[in-house]
Amino acid sequence: MHKTNTYLALGDSYTIGEAVPITGSFPYQAVNILRKEGERFSAPEIIAKTGWTTDELAAAIETHQFLEDYDFVTLLIGVNNQYRGREVEEYKLEFESLLKKAIGFADGKTERVIVLSIPDYSVTPFATEKDSPKIAHEIELYNSLNMALSTKYKVHYIDITEGTREAKNDASFLTSDGLHPSEKEYKRWAEKLAEYILSLNKK
């Protein structure tokens, strides 16, 4: 009998799927894809809240009751650090600390930890009145850091940023709030995540 896989998703609004039903979030869509492929998965455990920065996620982790370990862990965090004008160096330190925690949750199996890059919201209607080039540049900087740390700790990295820029010319990739991704956009992330998990589980 195949065991049931567990999946922990750490993040912010992009992980809970702000403005879409919970089943439309990328962790739930990924699990549904995997189940259709015959993989046994319990519902994703999501530790995320709209607006959370790296330190707020870290604080929530301190008070949460976790399982002993998880088969898969995703981490997607940082957009609110950028939005609030936090120092890049602070993000680097706090992200590294979170990544180490994520690896611990995966029982030290680094290949079972997946970092997703931060979406580029500079192209959204929400950012129209803001300094879009500055936002895009800073998100690129944040992503260069989380990617470098992912390489350092040998975890899997999924770049979803490029795809999120398509929302500039296609509103169907956003929810009605003009900022958060739609189920259609989350589906693309879920497919990349599910594809990677399937490749691991087939080994």
Image (cartoon, rainbow, N blue to C red):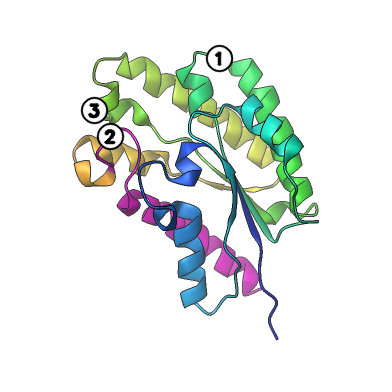
- Between the C-alphas of marks 1 and 2, the distance is 24 Å
Among the 4 quarters of the image, the one containing residue 60:
top right
Name the kind of residue labelled 2 in the image.
Asp
Measured along the vertical axis of the image, is residue 90 above or below residue 59? Answer: above
Q: Is residue 17 visible?
A: yes
Dominant secondary structure of the magenta stretch?
helix
Place residue 77 in its image quadrant.
top right
172 to 57, vertically: above or below: below
Identify the image quadrant of the C terminus. Answer: bottom right
Whole-percent x and y of residue 111?
69, 55
| Frontmost residue, 128 versus 47 | 47
Q: Residue at x 65, y 41 (%)?
A: 151
Horizontal side of residue 172 vs 118, given as left or right? left
Q: What amino acid is labelled 3 in the image? A: Pro
Which x, y percent locates residue 22? 44, 53
| Residue 177: mark | 2
Residue 153 in view: no
Q: Is residue 128 above or below residue 6?
A: above
Q: Residue at x 55, y 29 (%)?
A: 52
Quarter of the N terminus within the rendering: bottom right
Bounds of the magenta segment:
174-203
SS for callout 3: helix
User: Mark 3 or mark 1, which has the lower sequence index?
Assistant: 1
Residue 86 numbered mark, or none: 1
Q: Nearer the viewer, mark 2 or mark 3?
A: 2
Q: Residue at label 3?
A: 125
**Secondary element at image label 2:** loop
Camera-nearest residue between 90 and 70? 70
